[in-house]
Structures are given as structure tokens and as C-alpha cells.
Image: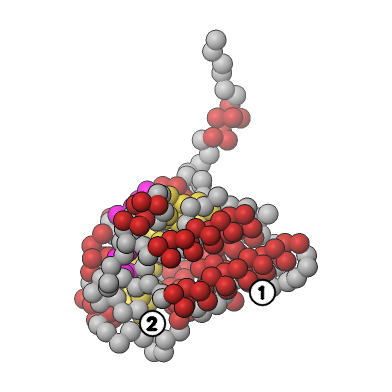
Amino acid sequence: MTSILSEDVVRRVRHDRRAFKRRVVVLPAYNAESTLRATIADIPREWVDEIILVDDCSPDRTVEIARELGLTTIAHKVNRGYGGNQKTCYDAALASGADVIFMLHPDYQYDGRLIPAFLNVLELGVCDVMLGSRVRTRRETLAGGMPIWKYFSNRMLTLVENVALGQNLGDFHSGFRCYTREVIETLPYHRFSDDFVFDSQFLAAAAHFGFKIGDAPMPCRYFAEASSINFRRSTTYGLRTLWTIAQYNLQRSGLGRFAIFEPVTGRQGRS
């Protein structure tokens, strides 16, 4: 027996593809001189219009190498922290007219060759935010060099975040992310922390404002030159992430109000 789909169903499935005319990669950098060239070599340049590197007052040759590679380079005069670096990244991307923004750590942990695949998901409108997940399987993740303590802490935090934020992501703590311009313009990211918890606040706010968040597998490399926060700072990051989740739930339940979940220009989000 055959059936004919109604035009309405077909229209809803085959909705218009979003056109991102300007695609920008941002690199929040600190002491990336030994990994920057390899990171840039993996980025498919025909798929991006500009690469912006923001250096957070590195004592090494990161800025010099970035300029040699022809990257748009911004150098902080003082160290502003990981979150502070991303704030400058997104300011610069918006100012350059970016329609879609890829945030990639320049420490060669993540595979920039997958940019076209992630772009396709955003263009189809399936998601507004995409993350590269390092944990397709435990064996692959540990074989890639992720310390076992970091793996288990990642699993526990990701579980809590999924439940609290109503998501189903494999890795909330990835250093490869891409967003539509609307996401960056909507989130009050200048109110977020200048430290590592910026990433957790960003995703919690994206969920609060109703953006669609997804992820896809991405191989990740751990080696001596790749940046990674130590156990003490990871513990601090974990505790601050849990506080961010608590704030999210207090805000959503009406029991509290927090600036990181308040609209920038009176917009109430899409949820």
C-alpha cells in the first residue's frame, strides 16, 4: 500500500536551508607556538572566510607565528583568562560580520578538518550550537590520552548537566564549538566569568534561551604540548559548573535571578 505525504509534511521536513555567507574561526590562544601551525593546517580554508586568533598575553611566539600565518591577530596586553579571551574572540567575530562562528582551541587537541560537517548541521537548521564530542566510546577517549580522572569527572558532570538542562549531549566540556550569529548576539556573554567556567555558563544560557544544542563525535589528542588544566583547577571548574547548574534551576523556577540568564536587550529567549 502506498501513501502520499501531504505538502505540509514535506514543507516542514524540507525547510529552507540557512545561508551563512561569512564563516569565521576564532582561536583563544595562550602559549600555542608549538601547536598553532598544525592546528591551522587542518582547517579547510576553502570553508572559512577568516581566522581570528586572540592571544592572552603569551610569553612565547604565538603572536609572531599567527601573523606569519596571515591570521587576523589580536593580542591582549594583560592576561584576561580563558573566558576573557573568548569574549574578545566573539566581539571580533561579530564585528567582522560573521554569520557562523567556530571556536577551536589552537593546541591541536581537536580536528579542524570536521568543520564542514558541523557547518552542515547548522545550515540545515538542525541545531544552533554544535559541540565536538571527545567521548564516543570510553576506549577511544582513553586511548587518545585523556587522563582517567578527567574522563570520569567529565562523565559525571555531563550527566548532571544533561539532566538539569534537559539535554542529551555526550560531552559538555569540548574545546570545539560552533554557533550561529544569533546565539552570540543573544547570550549575555560579557556577564560570564573570565575563567574556565565561561564554557559551562555559555551552554546553560544557550539552553535557557531555547537554542538547539547538539554534538557529534570528534577525535581528541592529548600530549605534552596540548593545554589542559590541572587537577586543582579542574576541581574548581567542576564546582563552579555545579553552581551554574544550580543558578539555572533557580532562575527557571522563579526562585532567583542571575545576570547570566537575563536578556541583553529585553529579549526573553525562545523557550
The amino acid on which the numbered mark 1 sits, given as a three-letter code, is Ala
Residue 174 in sight: no
The amino acid on which the numbered mark 2 sits, given as a three-letter code, is Asp
Using the numbered discs, state the Cα–Cα distance from disc 1 to disc 2 in whole angstroms.
25 Å
Instruction: Please state if 70 lies on the left or on the right of 103 as rendered.
Output: left
Please name the residue that numbered disc 2 is placed on: 56
Give SS at disc 1: helix
| Residue at the bottom extreme, as displayed | 78
Tell me the residue at 63%/65% (across/down): 245
Numbered label attached to residue 10: none
> Of 230 and 110, which appears nearest the observer?
230
> Of 162 and 50, which appears nearest the observer?
162
Q: How many marks?
A: 2
Numbered label attached to residue 259: 1
Residue 209: image location, x then y, percent: 63, 60
Q: Within the magenta stretch, is there residue 115?
A: yes
Colouring of the image: secondary structure
Q: Quadrant of residue 240?
A: bottom right
Give the extent of the magenta segment: 106-117
> Of 97 and 192, which appears nearest the observer?
192
Tell me the residue at 54%/35% (across/down): 13
Tell me the residue at 43%/65% (across/down): 149
Q: Within the magenta stretch, is there residue 81?
A: no
**Classed neighbour count for the residue bearing mark 1: other residues with Cα under 10 Å, few (<14), some (14–19), many (≥20):** few
| Residue at the right extreme, as displayed | 255
